[in-house]
Image (cartoon, rainbow, N blue to C red):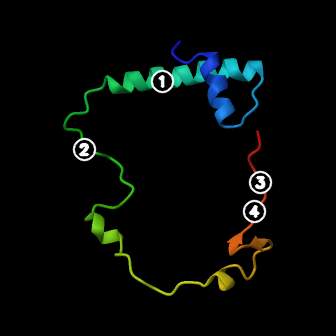
Amino acid sequence: MRIDEEQVRYVAALANLELTADEVRRMARELDQILSYMDKLNELDTEGVEPMAQVLYDADPEATLREDREGPTLSNEVALANAPLKGAGHFKVPKVIER
């Protein structure tokens, strides 16, 4: 097994997730299965295989993007006009990450 329970606990802590012992074991097993499947896919010879799906239709990359242009901007007062909390020219938001 390439993914062990210690690694799952470490990543869960980074994501601020609390996992039970059963969830840790299951995640380790499932992540290991995913990596094993990816190894199988990497064994395939894809030389000369044309891509079958694209996010953008077949066109020049510039065809769907516009150039950046200068335009009107909002002043701090206008941008903050409907903010529930503001201070020092910024939005104030509740703290969401605590350790």
Q: Quadrant of residue 39?
A: top left
Q: Circles 2 and 4: CB distance less than 8 Å?
A: no
The Cα–Cα distance between marks 3 and 4, rounded to whole angstroms, is 6 Å
| 76 sits left or right of 66 in the view | right
The residue pinned by badge 4 equals 93
In this rendering, which labeled residue sits more in front, label 3 or label 2? 3
What residue would you read off at disc 3? 95
Does the CB distance between marks 3 and 4 fall below 8 Å? yes
| Amino acid found under the numbered disc labelled 3 | Lys
Q: Earlier in the sequence, mark 3 or mark 2?
A: 2
Identify which amino acid the numbered label 1 is placed on.
Answer: Leu
Q: Is residue 27 above or below residue 93?
A: above
Q: CA distance from mark 3 to mark 1?
A: 35 Å
For mark 1, does the 10 Å Cα neighbourhood hold few (<14), some (14 to 19), or many (20 or more) residues?
Answer: some
Mark 3 lies on a secondary structure that is loop
Label located before the other in sequence (3 or 1): 1
Q: CA distance from mark 2 to mark 4?
A: 47 Å
Q: Amino acid at mark 4?
A: Val
Q: Position of residue 15 (x, y in %)?
A: 66, 37
Which residue has dot 2 on it? 50
Q: Amino acid at mark 2?
A: Glu
Front of the two marks 4 and 1 = 4
Which residue carries the number 1 mark? 35
Q: Residues within 10 Å of mark 2 (few under 14, many from 20)?
A: few
Indicate the quadrant where residue 93 lies.
bottom right
